[in-house]
Image (cartoon, helix red, strand yellow):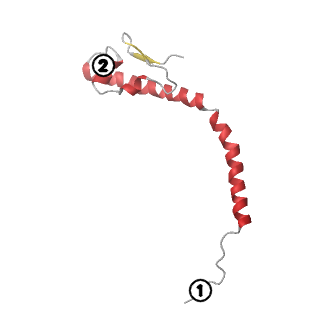
Amino acid sequence: MFMFKNNRGFTLIEMLIVLMIISVLIILIVPNLSGRTKEVNSKGCQALVSVVQTQVEAYALDHGQLPSDLQQLAAENYISEEQFTCPNNKNLVYDSSSGKVSAPN
């Protein structure tokens, strides 16, 4: 049986260098992420409007008419009540005459 005589691990200096490099990368990346919250919420709201608009159209195809309000969509399990509010805490607006869903600016 062959055995290695040199079974050294990492030295303390090598570990400190790796930790220093990781720390520098974190310091560079974290400030860039924190400034994006407003942009992420805006895009999330646009995506939610698209999803709810699609469900309004699906309801219209299934029932032959537009829903009267978003509560009717929730009652028939097309959307959940959590989908009434965007990630930036603005409520969706539904125009029953045109069937359009929007989010206030």
- Residue occupying the point 29% across, 27% down: 77
Tell me residue 42's x, y (percent): 54, 26
The answer to which quarter of the image holds residue 99 is top left
The residue that mark 2 highlights is: 72
Element type at mark 2:
helix
Tell me residue 64's x, y (percent): 26, 18
The residue that mark 1 highlights is: 3
Locate residue 65 relative to residue 92 in the image: left or right: left
Question: Is the C terminus in the top left, top right, bottom left or bottom right quadrant?
Answer: top right
Q: Earlier in the sequence, mark 2 or mark 1?
A: 1
The answer to which quarter of the image holds residue 69 is top left
Specify few, some or many for label 1: CA neighbours under 10 Å numbering under 14, 14-19, or 20 or more.
few
- Residue occupying the point 28% across, 15% down: 65
Q: In the rendered structure, find residue 95 and report the number of the disc placed on it.
A: none
Query: Does residue 101 sit above or below 39 in this rendering?
Result: above
The answer to which quarter of the image holds residue 48 is top left
Q: Amino acid at mark 1?
A: Met
